[in-house]
Each structure stands twice: as C-alpha cells, then as structure tokens.
Amino acid sequence: MANIKSAKKRVITSAKRALRNKSAKSAVKTSIKKVYAAIDANDKSAAEDALKKAIGEMEKAGSKGLYHKGTVSRKVSRLTKAVNKLG
C-alpha cells in the first residue's frame, strides 16, 4: 500500500475509473450479444433496434477513450453487415 498521500489518492481514483471503464465495456459487450442473439433468431426488426442501441453504446465508449476509434468503426461495420445480411 502507498504511504504518500497523493499516491493513496491515485490508488483510489484509479480503482474508481477502472470500475467505471469495466462497467462501460461490459455494457458494450452485452449490447453486441443482443444484436447477435436477434440475428440468430432471424428477427430483423429486433436486430435493427438492438443494432442502433449497440452503435450508441460503442460510440459513447469510443468517445470516452475506452476503445480506439478504429476498433469502434470495425465493430460497427461488422455488426451492420451481419444485420443487413438478414434480408
């Protein structure tokens, strides 16, 4: 454990941020799973709704620096492509 006051504060704030980041990443993963679940169920309207929510989650996480801009673009592109294949 840290002895210096600023180091103690750094440990606490880092833990808070890690928890927030973990929560946001988990939300993104859950939203992606919902899109794929709708695709597997062959439900295009549910997949499109889930896709809109998932894109919003990913863009939000990307703007906060949790994901690189290219990573967000790649994930959005692959999800959109999968939903568009439903026909």
Image (tube, helix red, strand yellow):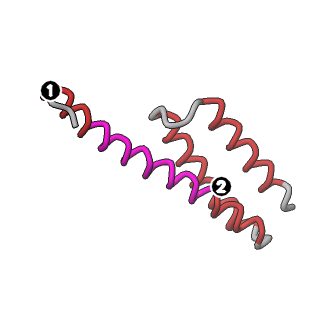
Identify the image quadrant of residue 83.
bottom right
Question: Which residue is found at the position 46% from the left and 49% from the top?
Answer: 24
Residue 70: image x %, image y %?
A: 65, 30
- For the residue pair 84 and 3, the one nearer the viewer reads as 3
Q: Residue 13 vs residue 86: left or right?
A: left
Residue 48: image x %, image y %?
A: 69, 59
Start-end of magenta stretch = 13-32
User: How packed is label 1: few (under 14 Cα within 10 Å), some, or many (20 or more)?
Assistant: few
Q: Residue 3 vs residue 30: left or right?
A: left
Question: Which residue is found at the position 80% from the left and 48% from the top?
Answer: 81
Magenta segment's dominant SS is helix
Disc 1: which residue: 4
Question: Which residue is found at the position 67% from the left and 60% from the top?
Answer: 35
First along the sequence among labels 2 and 1: 1
User: Could you tell me the amino acid type at mark 2?
Assistant: Leu
Q: Which dot marks residue 51?
A: 2
Quadrant of the snapshot with the N terminus: top left
User: Could you tell me the amino acid type at mark 1?
Assistant: Ile
